[in-house]
Amino acid sequence: MAANKYVCKVCGYTHEGNEAPSVCPLCKAGASEFEAVKAAKKKGFDTNSDIYAIIYSAVVVVIVAFLLAGVSSLLKPMQDANVELDKKKQILASLNERELADVAATYDELIVADPIINAAGEVVADEGGFEVKNDDVNEGNLPLYIANINGAKKYIVPMTGNGLWGGIWGYIALNDDCNTIYGVYFSHASETPGLGAEIAADKFQNGFTMDKDGNPIVKKVYDEEGNVALSVEKGKGKAAPEYHIDAVSGATLTCNGVDDMFKRKLAPYYSYLNNVKAGEPVVEEAPAAAEPAVETENVEQAPVDADAQDKKEE
């Protein structure tokens, strides 16, 4: 609260306080000689008031919010383009195409189709798989990428799952036999550095296509019955050698998440891939339209003159 002002009527001394002084310090006049001075009303807001502080803060917050919204709106196309480019980079990484100078150009060159299929093996749409968001993926809406590498087709299946601390995801590329692994790519949101985070390292990912000495090996996804047999296990594990992937030491829960991701996300693609492997058409062709029958015009023949006919024969 602001202090009151009192002026000495004898010498003009001004005192600020809750009440007038008992004695004027200049002329020694008593308290009765002091007169209270009414403070003039200030125009506008009192900058020292709580209301002013609240209103000022609210205005600043609104202005900053509008500025941030504007900047975000201006940068959104660039952000979307970066997200799209990173997704293409990850897909290409599963094809062992890394450290690329021009990701977009390489993607357009190698990826020849991105259909949407369903778990029954049918093609829902011939294109548009790239635009399918992770939250929209289900057994009736499965994105797939088809690449052409040196004349051979590769089938890239996207996958998402849960690790120890957050989401994990990846892509697995299969050879044209639709079962053996050509390459993989995995990443994560927040797995433990040096442990679960190692699923994104080359050492773990290389284990799907080569041994510890760098020699090529063959790993498969589906068994003879069409079940997902590919497994991430520590040590020898229970899976047969062609299905076994050695887990990261000390990252059991993250590797369990990767294994679960395989089982859940690769299973719905089997029918389509099996149809491709068997050489069956994955898109039913529309029957050829029958040619319209040509209507013959009925022409009425003129009566034959018998005498003229006889003369002609003679």
Image (tube, helix red, strand yellow):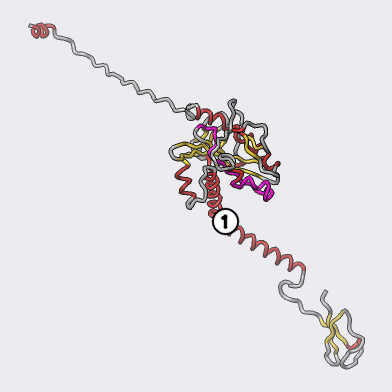
Which quadrant holds the N terminus?
A: bottom right
| In the depicted structure, whether residue 10 falls above or below residue 139 | below
Q: Residue furthest front?
A: 213
- Indicate left or right for 257 with 107 as reference: right
Where's residue 102, x and y in %? Answer: 47, 51
Neighbour tally class for label 1: few under 14, some 14-19, many 20 plus, Cα within 10 Å:
few
Q: In the rendered structure, which segment of residues is drawn in magenta?
A: 177-202
Q: Taking 188 as reference, is 224 above or below it? A: above
Pick the front one: 134 or 9: 134
Is residue 188 within the magenta segment?
A: yes
Q: Nearer the viewer, residue 67 or 33?
A: 67
User: Residue 12 at x, y = what percent?
Assistant: 83, 90
Residue 108 painted magenta: no
In the displayed structure, does residue 12 sit left or right of residue 178?
Answer: right
Q: In this view, does 300 lie to the left or right of 59?
A: left
Write down the quadrant of residue 253 in the picture: top right
Tell me the kind of residue under disc 1: Ser
Residue at (47, 28) in percent of width and height? 281
